Image (cartoon, helix red, strand yellow):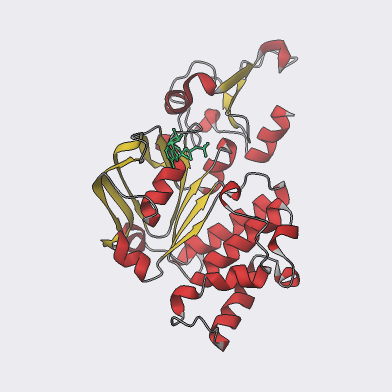
Amino acid sequence: MTEAARTPEADALPGIVARDVAVTYRNGHTALSGVSFSIPQGSITALVGVNGSGKSTLFKAIMGFVPLASGTVTILGQPAGRARDRNAVAYVPQAEDVDWNFPILVEDVVMMGRYGHMNVLRIPRRIDREKVAAALDRVGMADFRKRQIGELSGGQKKRVFLARALAQEGRVILLDEPFTGVDVTTEEAIVSLLRNLRAEGRVMLVSTHNLGSVPEFCDRAILINRTILAAGPTEAVFTRANLEIAFGGVLRHFVLGGTDLHDDADQRQVTVITDDERPFVFYGEDGVDGAASRPSQGPADPIPASRGREARD
Ligand SMILES: Nc1ncnc2c1ncn2[C@@H]1O[C@H](COP(=O)(O)OP(=O)(O)OP(=O)(O)O)[C@@H](O)[C@H]1O
């Protein structure tokens, strides 16, 4: 299905709905409370917040890896547990959450995505092998299938875990910091893949510190800090004011204007907002005053992320 084939009706189908979710770890720390949001099918949502704001905890809550102290999560209109039992939810963990010393071949990692489709003996059938091969092909890792996962680069490992999610055929894919430690080419390949998956009507929730990439490929965004600070379409959520609330003192914030930027009387300024990965850049006359600088609005349009990177370097 192409992007153009998406219908408003498809967009309106519920993807992930959280209602008043709270998570308290066993040590008594409440990492999330009062978390409510709704994201539709056929969408990519960025999950953005400072270190320790609860992004991974939210993924773990959706995956059922940590119990909810209160609230509910529904996935594709079903209770989360039932959707998980039906293999509807695939999870691409943060690199740090994986034991890379575990001796396992790339194709076996991807085959793990098929476990939910197999019987208890977990003997792969032809269809499982075909799905694994197709998934590896789709992420450009077919030639690496007989390699040990631990021997791969960070970006290659990410692709393999994406392939595992594809082999699982989940309609909901959770990606915990998929761009950390990957080069620009791999990031672009991942973004392109996510766009294709969106066009297929899947739901993706992507945690990232690459603020500059978010307006490029995420149609929605959630700002989080132990609770939801803002959630909705990216252009409404990704404002300078909201980002300052989400990142507070940890946000780096540069403004270039006047003779630093121009050798004429041009009044426009560049505002760079970053939590130290790919920055978010506002460019325009109101870039400096904090007034509703929205990514998609006229003179305050952000410089595309690739130019944003140049601005930082
Ligand atoms: N197993 C655990 N037991 C107790 N507290 C935990 C546990 N895991 C995480 N936390 C705490 O919960 C809070 C949220 O952590 P979480 O890993 O969800 O944040 P995050 O937004 O994913 O951070 P980062 O951007 O650094 O990955 C932090 O204060 C963290 O110390």
- Residue 258 locus on image (x, y percent): 67, 12
- Say left or right for 138 vs 207: right
Name the residue located 66 percent from the left edge and 67 percent from the top edge.
104
Q: Is 268 rendered above or below residue 79?
A: above
Please state the horizontal and vertical placement of residue 272, each as a whole percent of the image: 60, 25
Residue located 46% across and 44% down the image: 56
Which is nearer the eye, 46 or 113? Answer: 113
Front residue (pair 180, 279): 180
Q: Answer with left or right where residue 300 lies relative to residue 10.
A: right
Image quadrant holding the C terminus, namely top right
Please provide percent x and percent y for residue 102: 65, 61
Residue 156: quarter of image: bottom right
Which residue is most to the front?
A: 27
Taking 60 as reference, is 257 above or below it? above
The answer to whether any part of residue 268 appears in the image is no
Is residue 253 something that shows in the picture? yes
Drawn side of residue 51 relative to residue 189, left or right: left
Q: Nearer the viewer, residue 11 or 143?
A: 143
x and y percentages locating residue 254 in the rendered image = 62, 19
The answer to whether 239 is drawn above or below residue 194 in the figure is above
State the count of labels: 0
